[in-house]
Amino acid sequence: MNRGAANRPPIDTIVTERAVLEPLTVGHAVEMVETLGHPSLYEFIGGTPPSLAELRRRYALQSIGHSEDGSQWWLNWVVRPPGSTVPAGYVQATVESRTRGAEADLAWVIAPQFQHKGLATAATDGVIQWLKTAGIEMFAAYIHPNNEASNSVARRVGMHPTPTVEDGEIRWELVSPTTFS
């Protein structure tokens, strides 16, 4: 999939029974700074809570939707519980061509007060289903082996751990059954 940015479907709002995913904009930075402010969110992924200025810079780049050379498609959503105005976190996907076809690398972060309610699973599965409609059939996530919450989300959306380890994180994969038919 080296489809130019003009040929990619526009990012949509995704609504599931347990989550509403809004396409990321720079305007989300103000409300996300508090959501992403809890230090426990960085225990396994590293880093520290971002400042408002950092989020604005990051979101300005991410909301472009693709890398400069067009080889990556950047998709980012802010996650909210249905009916809530408070953001719970985000899900992101970076799509690029691989040897076997286009693959989406997934990541998700949900603030502590929203965890253990199925929100991360619903949001991540919603993104996977949306990407499948865009023709993506391979999915991956890199998760620290001690991050039980993210390991559980990966398992619940149908991913399986692989022997591949990068920077101390295990690669989880989901390959849609239609990929090799």
Image (cartoon, rainbow, N blue to C red):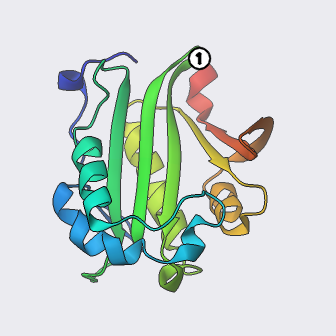
Q: Quadrant of residue 147?
A: bottom right
**Quick one: quadrant of the N terminus?**
top left
Residue drawn at 20 percent across, 55 percent down: 25
Q: Is residue 81 visible?
A: no
Residue closer to the observer: 112 or 83? 112
- Percent across and percent down for residue 166 are 72, 37
Residue drawn 28% across and 83% down?
84
106 to 6, vertically: above or below = below
Q: Quadrant of residue 126?
A: bottom left
Identify whether 54 is placed above or below 5: below
Mark 1 residue element? loop
Q: Residue at x 43, y 37 (%)?
A: 94
Tally of numbered discs: 1
Q: Is residue 37 left or right of residue 70?
A: right
Indicate the position of residue 53 as horizontal and vertical percent values. 25, 61
Q: Residue furthest right?
A: 163
With 97 as the anchor, is 164 left or right in this view? right
From the image, tell me which residue sits under label 1.
100
**Residue 133 x, y percent position in the rendering:** 37, 38
x 22%, y 38%: residue: 64
Please state which of residues 87 and 48 is positioned toward the viewer in this rendering.
48
Q: Position of residue 118 (x, y in %)?
A: 54, 74
Which of the pair 132/96 is nearer the observer? 96
Tell me if residue 137 can be seen: yes
Label 1 CA crowd tier, 10 Å (few <14, some 14–19, many 20+): few
Camera-nearest residue between 150 and 127? 150
**Screen quadrant of the C terminus:** top right
Q: What amino acid is at disc 1?
A: Arg
